[in-house]
Image: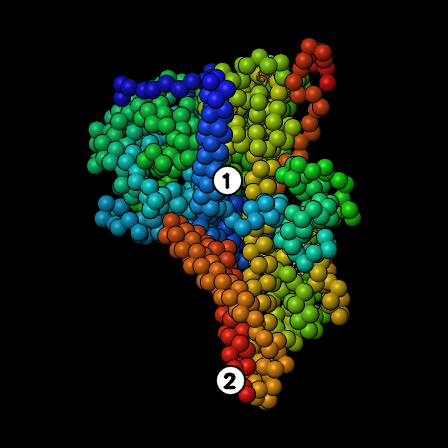
Amino acid sequence: MALTFDYQGGIYPPERKSRSSQASLQYAPLPARVTLPLRQHSGRPATACVTPGQHVQVGTLIARRDGLISADVHASISGTVTQVSEHAIQIESDNLDTRQPLAPLDWRETDALTLLARLDESGVVGLGGAGFPTQVKARVIERHAIDTLIINAAECEPYITADDITLQRYPGEVLEGAQLMASLCGAGQIVIGIEDNKPEAIAALKQAITQSRPAPITLGVIPIRYPSGSEKLLIKTLLNRTVPSLGLPADVGVLCHNPGTLLAALQAVRDGQPLVQRVVTLTGEAISRPGNYWVRLGTPIDELLAYAGLERSRLDKVVQGGPMMGSTLETLSAPATKTTNCLIAATQSELPPAPPASPCIRCGACENVCPVQLLPQQLHWYARAQEDDKLERYHLFDCIECGACSYVCPSHIPLVDDYREAKSRLRHQRIEAAKADHAKHRFEFRQARLAREEAEKQARRHARQAQNRPGAASSTEATAAPQADLRSLRIAQTAAKAAVRKAEKVLAREAQQAPNESHEDLEMQLATARENLKAADLQLAQARQSASAPEESP
Amino acid sequence: MSDAVSLWGIISAIGILTGLGVGFGALLGAVSERFKGDAHPLVDQIDALLPQTQCGQCGYPGCRPYAEAINEGDALNKCPPGGDATIQALADLLGREAEPLDGDAPEENRVAFIREAECIGCTKCIQACPVDAIIGAAKQMHTVIEDECTGCDLCVDPCPVDCIDMRPRSAPLTQWQPVMPFTASVITSDRSPAGGN
Ligand code: SF4
Ligand code: SF4
Ligand code: SF4
Ligand code: SF4
């Protein structure tokens, strides 16, 4: 593809990819024990469905997806389940590595629903880092028309080479996986976005493209710059489409997938192999055999690093993910999960700790590098002052947390930490607000129910009295049943009717727009309106009766 | 002559201006009738700021009645579950002075828990709960739906066998919030040397 479009900002940190990209892809040894967290994806944790003592094989389902956005978890080794806790499942290996695959499918011959179900039951999630369930992403066509599938092979963060090696090793299979996903979401073309520092992968892809059918594939080689692999920027660069603020790529007809995810999706369909292993880059100056490894999910990280030749005396810290967006691990006994794409065992001199932060000097360096044109220093100021409305106005939620601003800040302010903190605070506030709203609706429902019950009781009492002492009932009541009262009750009843109609309309509209979501709150409001209507009906009927009663009785 | 002209001018000016006034008044009236909002927009706004715990500690039977009372001029500082944040938000909304909280702010987010073995199934707590968060039937053991409970305390007193506790609410891990140590000075000015806090 000749044409690529530019975006503003971005930085050029040292790449440091050569150490891990030179070695060929290897298999890490089978671990003796794995710990599989129930939450290795975005969304809700899966629910364990095995018990300690149970025997499992590679690919046995051990935890089921819970809710819409969640993913299944499968055993990554064969052996015995030793522990099932709230957060993770532990399996002790029997060293046999027996497998329990699903039935292989030919995706060209299989209907979309079966394929989606297969992706679902294979626990495939985005392997680029966010871990969004792939089947949920594929279902986006229920609401958006997709025309382009982008293979996001930019891999712009320093150190990481997992996608590079995957493409060098399995170019045909990645493209086949892309064809599969493209046909699932109805995309007519596939575009590969890859940075020009991966010549071997580009050569391998060029060759594989000629044999890939049916969707046409274009190769978009883009110049290196961080963070061009961010979805929105890649879409801008390759297609010159701008994803709206707070929007999704699907809003402009695009889906992005990482090469590793496409490979996993193909393996799940073609070979019936659930997601039990992934490619992890092991690198950093504190290990002597850096490279890319096929790693069983749940393998302890210290075991992996030890296998890659960790020199503990030189080790300063281990970073999971890239140096820009990743996080330093607190403990090395943590397991590798579906979202572990890279482990950097860094020495002190390699990734030195940030010097203490000093106040902002308003130099504007951060603004110049922000790839989404935010004002990082303003955001920093408002985040610390907790001026929440300003944060929203300055588009805090468009920040992709790329860290470019912290990288260039001469005052060494950990700007991204501020944004993360502010985002989580705002999200928390939204949850609280939704909860308060819900409590309010429940309260209103209860009030309405009590009113209806009271009206029913009144009606019953009235009927009883009328039966027992005909004529007397009305005379004990306010005999001059005021017409004005009747009128206001009629108005109340009409208003209640209108409220029911309005609630029904709102519910119907929402149910149509988002059929898969729960509308419990709206249903509650409708029920409240109905209760109110019932109470109004009863009161009106009763008032009418007592108004007409005096005339009948002599 | 000039007097007559100016008199005529004054009269016509008064006439035109009166006409304009009446015309625009009618227009405004019609527009406000046409685009009439909800019956009590301010009460709704106040209600939206209250925590909806429905506990009655403000002296009103629920948050909405308190919102109505505030609209009529009642003090802003009567809602302990909302605490200072709510008072501040109300003061901002209404342009009134924020006052210190009248009462003790709850120290933590709590939820009711029924010791089910001891419950005699009297349904007294069900009648007390403002949000229908307790399920159970007469002479059956009762239990609290944690997600629906607002932690208002109202079910504790009516229980004849004291089997309801208020316990700290367990927050899901996904809602964990980082705690950040912030330095006081954010932006350096020429009055404070760079690097100094
Ligand atoms: S972290 Fe956010 S504010 Fe900073 S450069 Fe990246 S997108 Fe811009
Ligand atoms: S780069 Fe740092 S010092 Fe410069 S304006 Fe941005 S936050 Fe302030
Ligand atoms: S004190 Fe309780 S009932 Fe009153 S406004 Fe606050 S939360 Fe609502
Ligand atoms: S269960 Fe008890 S504490 Fe919870 S909302 Fe109901 S009455 Fe209040």
Q: Is residue A199 above or below residue B73?
A: above
The response on whether ligand 1 sits within 8 Å of label 1 is no
Examine the rendering and report whether any part of residue A167 can be seen.
Answer: no
Q: Which mark is residue A308?
A: none
Place of residue A31 in the rendered image (x, y in percent of width and height, measured from the top left): 51, 41
Q: Nearer the viewer, residue A418 or A505?
A: A505
Q: Tell me what residue is drawn at x 32 percent, y 20 percent.
A: A4
Question: Mark 1 or mark 2: which comes first in sequence?
Answer: 1
Which residue position holds label 1? Answer: A337
Q: Tell me what residue is drawn at x 51 percent, y 84 percent.
A: A552
Q: Nearer the viewer, residue A542 or B57?
A: A542
Place of residue A298 in the rendered image (x, y in percent of width and height, measured from the top left): 52, 42
Badge 1 amino acid: Thr
The subunit letter for the residue under badge 2 reads A
Place of residue B2 in the rendered image (x, y in percent of width and height, measured from the top left): 48, 17
- Circle 1: is it few (<14), some (14-19), or many (20+) Cα within 10 Å? many
**Is A214 on the left-hand or right-hand side of A538?**
left
* Quarter of the C terminus of chain A within the rendering: bottom right
Badge 2 amino acid: Glu
| Residue A198: quarter of image | top left
Which residue position holds label 2? Answer: A552
* Quarter of the N terminus of chain A within the rendering: top left
